Image (tube, helix red, strand yellow):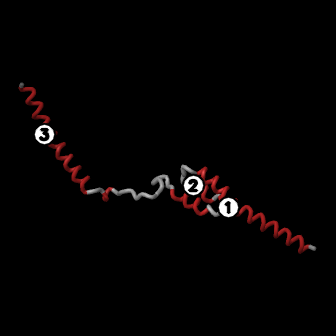
Amino acid sequence: MFLNYFALGVLIFVFLVLFYGIIAIHDIPYNIAKKRQHPHADAIHTAGWISLFTLHAIWPFLWIWATLYQPERGWGMQNPRLESDRLPEVDALALRVAELENKLATLQPTAAQNTQEH
């Protein structure tokens, strides 16, 4: 008789662990999204609950959706350029602007003197 009750207790325990385990697993993408301050965290959470009814068929896509966003980079699909990766044309233009600024600085005092003479 004791073994019957023990088996029933084990069965109930296993059922509860599986039930709460599935619910905890479905929340993983939402927790990732919340940690990363994802702009669609609420949608991910709702889709996670919906995935319970689809036997978690969409759950891997929710995980991908949640991990794509990073607060410092956005969606993470672009590779930000480093300062050393600038185009050579930009460096040439920056040098040309500096030269023109130097010329302008040397011309301004002479232009001020010419206006005082007239």
Q: Tell me the residue that label 2 is attached to.
A: 33
**Real-space Cα distance between discs 3 and 1?**
75 Å
Tell me the tag on residue 106.
Answer: 3
**Real-space Cα distance between discs 3 and 2?**
57 Å
Which residue is drawn at the image coordinates 73% and 61% (left, top)? 20
Left or right: residue 56 compared with residue 37: right
Q: Nearer the viewer, mark 3 or mark 2?
A: 2
Single out the residue that lies furthest toward the left.
Answer: 117
Is the residue marked by circle 3 packed among few (<14), some (14-19), or many (20+) residues within 10 Å?
few
Q: Tell me the residue that label 1 is attached to.
A: 54
Is the residue marked by circle 1 packed among few (<14), some (14-19), or many (20+) residues within 10 Å?
few
Closest to the observer: 80 or 58? 58
Tell me the tag on residue 35.
Answer: none
**Mark 3 or mark 2, which has the lower sequence index?**
2
Instruction: Give the SS element for disc 1.
Output: loop
Amino acid carrying label 1: it is: Thr
Position of residue 59 relative to residue 117, above or below, is: below
Is the residue marked by circle 2 packed among few (<14), some (14-19), or many (20+) residues within 10 Å?
many
Instruction: Give the SS element for disc 3.
Output: helix
Closest to the observer: 51 or 63? 51
Which quadrant of the rendered structure holds the C terminus?
A: top left
Amino acid carrying label 2: it is: Ala
Single out the residue that lies furthest toward the top.
Answer: 118
**Mark 2 or mark 1, which has the lower sequence index?**
2
Left or right: residue 8 compared with residue 105: right
